[in-house]
């Protein structure tokens, strides 16, 4: 909270080169790219960072295999290159994962023909992953007994990328990277209007934690508001070539279904892709793809029934899943970029390709669409655009993404080994503690090692059933701008996605975690979280 207060003061008193509106993936990489290259940058979000679309994905980093059906070869080529680059740049975070794909009898294309598409996909992807394999129904059943094969014509296995932790954590690490390079950021700070005055953008903002309003000054304004890009542009009189259509997607988290650590991929009853995704001891199932007019969405009973019916139809379970089996839910909109006012666009065929519109005269930039896989391209393009707007980019060639270099990584693991860190890994943990800390925090994991050296208790799990030690909570409290308890439980971590809210509230250690993060406001923040959960339950 001290960090946020300090940044609010800087936002009031500094004139920035660029102000980024929105802390989703597009805004996060824009800020990280600009700040690392020496541009005086600020970023604000009306809620928490990665609080909307960027925390509601399937956690997949994929090259867009489904776009092959629409012959979008150039897009698939671009996304595959981006996927490979992410896997090379973040080897601890973005990992290869195998997909077991099942084709039902009567599907619109023969299984072997679809399999040939995976060969093409592998080739477009520069053979970066393991090769695909064609699978008979018998072989599918052997690889994963949970797959129902009585109506299966065949299938195949292929590879794509996967986020080992969660999407919002990945996005936040770009925010944190931008902060390390001097970017001034604040969450729960909403733009309520911007005006161009004397060559500067003057943006009036409202602090949702206090109700206070003040102004931020910047030479350029970057609208990365995700699904709210059009709304903000309309409010400040910006006309753009692109606009958004919206598709709602949901996922349900249940106890682990399959024995395999591979993604099970099917075509749902409506013909669209449906995934059963491993999450350690849990499984994420979905997604839906429903056109909506408004980005403010929620999960309906119809959405839940669609996902539950499909998983019950496609898998051979001990008993059918019901709503009582749902541990957590994700719901978000996918902003789909379209040109002009074409209301006849076939939104089912729209890709997640990003588009960037620029008003050079007023130094205003709008980012439309996009997906996590394409994030490095967005960051690179924004830096080039800002330079073209006449704003000095001191280090245009500096690399702004990726894990720390091998020397730093080796030094970290040597230090962790010398401390015997992995010997105190909790027995319930899915991986050694040293590896988990490096993946989540990179170079900042050194700070946790120092905390553990000073007090070995900092290596202890603090919240029961959650793989987060006390030292992590201390680090998060110091540098991750956790303003509400939900920020930590849902977005800085994935605790709320694998443990039910009721079990979280009852967990020993939660109150202590609140004391670390919020000090004398611990009781207030915990009560706010409990009350918000009660309201959600009543709504459902």
Image (cartoon, grey):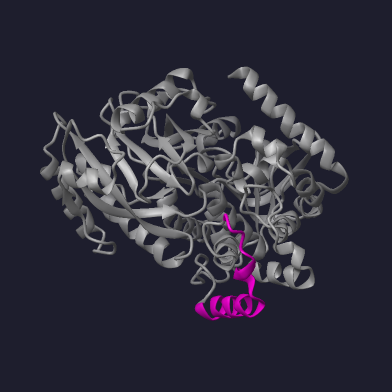
Give the residues drawn in magenta, as a range: 406-428
Rendered view: 426 above or below 323: below
State whether residue 401 is above or below residue 57.
below
Please tell me whether residue 329 is drawn above or below residue 140 in the rendered image. above
Horizontally, is 164 left or right of 202 in the view? left
Image x and y of residue 363, in percent: 56, 49
Residue farthest toward the right in the current orientation of the protein: 520
- Tally the marks: 0
Horizontal side, residue 50 vs residue 120: left or right: right
Picture coordinates of residue 421 (x, y %)?
A: 63, 71
Residue 108 visible here:
yes
Quarter assignment of residue 207: top right
Query: Would residue 196 be visible to someone looking at this image?
Result: no
| Near-viewer residue (446 or 369) | 446
Answer with left or right where residue 173 lies relative to residue 10: left
Give the vertical position of 92 relative to 302 (above or below). below
Instruction: Assign the C terminus to one quadrant of the image.
Output: top right
Residue 464 magenta = no
Residue 182 position within the rendered picture, expressed as x and y whole percent measured from the top left: 68, 63
Magenta stretch encompasses residue 409: yes
Type of secondary structure dominating the magenta stretch: helix
Q: Can you give x and y, in whole percent of width and height, for residue 9 in the image?
A: 81, 52
The quarter holding residue 290 reads: top left
Q: On the picture, is 273 further left or further right than 357?
A: left
* Residue nearest the viewer, comparing 520 with 284: 284
Q: Residue at x 35, y 32 (%)?
A: 317
Residue lying at 19% horizontally and 31% vertically, measured from the top left: 150
The residue lying toward the viewer, choosing from 2 and 252, is 252
Which of these two is toward me, 476 or 77?
476
The single residue placed furthest to the front in the displayed view is 318
């Amino acid at each position: 909270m001290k960090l946020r207060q300090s940044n609010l003061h800087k936002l009031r008193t500094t004139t920035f080169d660029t102000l980024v509106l929105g802390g989703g993936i597009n805004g996060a990489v824009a800020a990280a790219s600009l700040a690392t290259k020496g541009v005086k940058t600020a970023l604000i979000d009306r809620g928490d960072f990665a609080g909307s679309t960027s925390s509601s994905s399937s956690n997949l980093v994929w090259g867009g295999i489904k776009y092959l059906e629409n012959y979008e070869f150039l897009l698939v080529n671009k996304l595959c290159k981006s996927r490979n680059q992410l896997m090379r740049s973040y080897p601890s975070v973005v990992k290869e994962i195998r997909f077991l794909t099942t084709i039902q009898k009567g599907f619109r294309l023969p299984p072997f023909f679809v399999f040939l598409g995976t060969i093409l996909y592998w080739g477009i992807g520069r053979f970066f992953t393991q090769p695909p394999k064609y699978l008979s129904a018998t072989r599918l059943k052997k690889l994963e007994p949970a797959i129902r094969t009585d109506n299966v014509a065949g299938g195949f296995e292929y590879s794509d990328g996967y986020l080992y932790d969660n999407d919002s954590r990945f996005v936040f690490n770009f925010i944190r990277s931008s902060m390390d390079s001097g970017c001034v950021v604040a969450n729960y700070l909403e733009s309520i209007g911007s005006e161009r005055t004397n060559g500067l953008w003057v943006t009036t903002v409202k602090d949702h934690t206090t109700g206070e309003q003040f102004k931020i000054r910047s030479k350029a304004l970057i609208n990365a508001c995700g699904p709210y890009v059009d709304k903000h542009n309309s409010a400040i009189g910006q006309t753009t070539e692109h606009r958004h259509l919206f598709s709602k997607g949901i996922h349900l988290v249940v106890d682990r279904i399959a024995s395999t650590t591979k993604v099970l991929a099917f075509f749902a009853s409506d013909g669209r892709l449906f995934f059963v995704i491993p999450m350690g001891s849990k499984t994420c199932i979905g997604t839906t793809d429903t056109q909506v007019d408004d980005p403010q969405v929620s999960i309906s009973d119809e959405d839940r029934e669609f996902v539950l019916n499909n998983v019950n139809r496609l898998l051979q379970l001990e008993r059918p899943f019901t709503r009582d089996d749902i541990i957590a839910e994700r719901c978000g909109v996918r902003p789909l970029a379209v040109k002009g006012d074409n209301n006849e666009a076939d939104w089912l065929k729209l890709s997640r390709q990003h588009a960037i519109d620029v008003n050079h005269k007023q130094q205003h930039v709008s980012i439309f669409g996009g997906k996590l896989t394409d994030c490095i391209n967005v960051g690179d393009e924004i830096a080039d655009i800002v330079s073209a707007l006449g704003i000095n980019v001191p280090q245009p060639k500096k690399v702004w993404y990726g894990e720390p270099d091998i020397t730093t990584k080796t030094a970290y693991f040597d230090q962790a080994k010398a401390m015997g860190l992995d010997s105190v890994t909790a027995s319930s943990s899915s991986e050694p503690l040293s590896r988990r800390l490096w993946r989540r925090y990179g170079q900042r994991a050194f700070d946790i090692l120092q905390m553990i050296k000073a007090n070995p208790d900092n290596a202890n799990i603090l919240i029961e059933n959650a793989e987060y030690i006390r030292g992590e909570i201390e680090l998060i409290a110091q540098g991750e701008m956790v303003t509400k308890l939900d920020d930590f439980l849902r977005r800085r971590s994935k605790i709320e996605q694998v443990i039910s809210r009721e079990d979280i509230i009852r967990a020993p250690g939660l109150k202590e975690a609140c004391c670390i993060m919020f000090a004398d406001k611990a009781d207030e923040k915990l009560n706010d979280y409990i009350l918000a959960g009660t309201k959600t339950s009543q709504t459902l």
